[in-house]
Every structure is written in C-alpha cells, then in structure tokens.
Amino acid sequence: MDCDSAVIYRFNRDFSGEFIAESVVGQWTPVLQQTQTNEPSLFRDSLEGLCNLKDWRTSPTVVADTYIQETQGGIYAFSINYRCVQDIYEKDFTPCYIQLLEKFQVRAYIIVPIFCGSQLWGLIGVYQNARSLCWSEPEINMVIQIGIQLGFAFQILILTT
C-alpha cells in the first residue's frame, strides 16, 4: 500500500479511546510518540474551542472525542465500513480538525471500523502524509479486510480469556 503510517485506535466503554499500535515509515513522527510527549501545548490549540476533541485524560494517548462519545461510535457504528479522504484540504472539514490532522502529519487517509462481534471495538487508520492520494479500490478493500480480521482476532481473544 502507498501509505506512510497506520494506527489502531481502541475505544473505551465511554467511547473515549486511545492509540494502541502504530507502524510508521520514513521520516514521519509516530502519533504515539507525539501523544506521549510531556508537551501539553502540542494539542492545546486543537483541543480547545470548536474542536470535538476535548482532553487527553489520565493517559496522554487517551482521546475524548465528544462527537464519537455522543453518537457511540459515530458514522462507524452505523454500517459505514470505511471513510476515505483523498486530500484533507479538499474536504469541508472544520479548521480545528484540519489543524489536528496537520499535527499528526496526515494529508489523506482511510479509516475502517473494527468490530468485535456486533460491538464497535476500535478503528484502523491508514495515512498518506506527504501528499494527496486517490486510494484505489483494492487498497480500500485491503484495509477493510484487515479491520474484519482484527475484529475476529479480538473476539477470539476475548472468548478464550
């Protein structure tokens, strides 16, 4: 796949969540490294005001997104099997969301839900950081299949523990 990074984001019971795994190529700064710094100013501007993201709770990787919490998973909980953005600057995103994506160095992305049974467990995100990208159907389908397989794996882990 033509991507610079991929993350797995797990939801908590209240639909806050945290980044739990990441793969990064090249010179890009890992999201986990950014969220684990001791610099609270890194996200202050994005987390205040109009932005849906409100705070980094007890762990610097925990994210409370009021839209996701209020809708209990947002669009991903309602049979949307992916969201694909070719260029964040060509979408009608709020300035706050654009700022957050820029801080994470994201220019284009695919987000896929991970279901454990019928429960929305988390999200997998695949990012192109350097440029816009017209994601191909095989790339989108590959990320969807990875999300499905992760869901099966997590369901088996839960059943066997």
Image: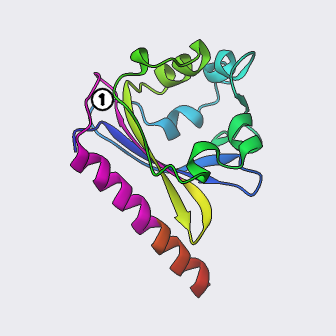
Mark 1 is surrounded, within 10 Å at the Cα level, by few (under 14), some (14 to 19) or many (20 or more) other residues, namely: few
| Residue drawn where x is 44% and y is 46% of the image | 82
Q: Is residue 135 above or below residue 150?
A: above
In the rendering, at what x and y percent does residue 73 appear? 65, 48
What's the amino acid at mark 1?
Gln
| Residue drawn where x is 50% and y is 49% of the image | 80
Total numbered labels: 1
In this picture, residue 124 sits left or right of residue 126 = right
Q: Quadrant of the C terminus?
A: bottom right
| Residue drawn where x is 33% and y is 27% of the image | 86
Q: Secondary structure at mark 1?
A: loop
Viewer-nearest residue: 134 or 78: 78
Residue beneath label 1, please?
27
Viewer-nearest residue: 38 or 107: 107
Q: Is residue 54 magenta?
A: no
Viewer-nearest residue: 127 or 88: 88
